[in-house]
Image: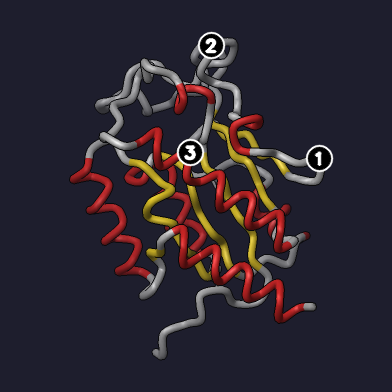
Amino acid sequence: MARQPTIVGNPVLLVIDIQKSAFMEVKAGIPVMPGYRENMQRARSVVDAAHDAGIPVVFVQEIHRRDMVDYGRELDGSEDIHCMEGEPGTPVAFEEMGRLPGDYYVPKRRYSCFYGTEMEILLKGLKAQTLILVGGMTDVCVHYSFVDGHQGDYHCRVVADCVGGTSPEAHRAALNAMEYLQEGAVMSAEDIITAMSEQRMAAE
């Protein structure tokens, strides 16, 4: 098939799990690659560009109950306790990311932002066709959300310098896996911001 345009139809920006912990010195429960914080800070530029272009922004938050009833199998691997409600690193970094009153919020109990959430209903209401992903972790929540979006027939774009993985190797492997599913899916902040601006100008 021919390579698809950067933005097809109506885009929506998904801000995956950019929580207060991203800007703290200690990341409880999950390893992060060097440069993780810088990539999360850079994601703010994409959020701002989406606001400027009138593109809906959805903040996604992984959060777990304190009695741990909803962790499921998440603690069977390399991750320790993380994203527990009431902990200082768990709230969404709304201030750091420049949330506006019209932005949306979807909590989740699993890695994918589609699993057991209202995401599909929200995206249908927004008539979304292209999903733009920033946040963390590249190889976990971003990757699994991308895959579910892909399987739901959305055009998916991941902003490589605005996501961060558990290690540089895992980060690169996940980006490669997403590019394998949709050619042209992996983009830079500069390129996606340009595409957002062009779409705004075309609509004016």
* Residue 149 image point, x, y percent: 51, 60
Q: Nearer the viewer, residue 163 or 81?
A: 163
* Residue 53 image point, x, y percent: 70, 63
- Mark toward the start of the polypeptide (1 vs 2): 2
For disc 1, the neighbor class at 10 Å (few under 14, some 14 to 19, many from 20) is few
* Residue 176 image point, x, y percent: 26, 61
* Secondary structure state at the residue bearing disc 2: loop
* Secondary structure state at the residue bearing disc 1: loop
For disc 3, the neighbor class at 10 Å (few under 14, some 14 to 19, many from 20) is some
The answer to whether residue 13 is above or below residue 75 is below
- Residue furthest out toward the left: 169
- The colour mode here is secondary structure
- Residue 91 quadrant: top right
Amino acid carrying label 3: it is Gln
Q: Which residue is mark 1?
A: 101
On-image quarter of the N terminus: bottom left
On-image quarter of the C terminus: bottom right
The answer to whether residue 44 is above or below residue 70 is below
Task: State the CA–CA distance, disc 2 to disc 3.
Answer: 21 Å
Which mark, residue 41? Answer: 3
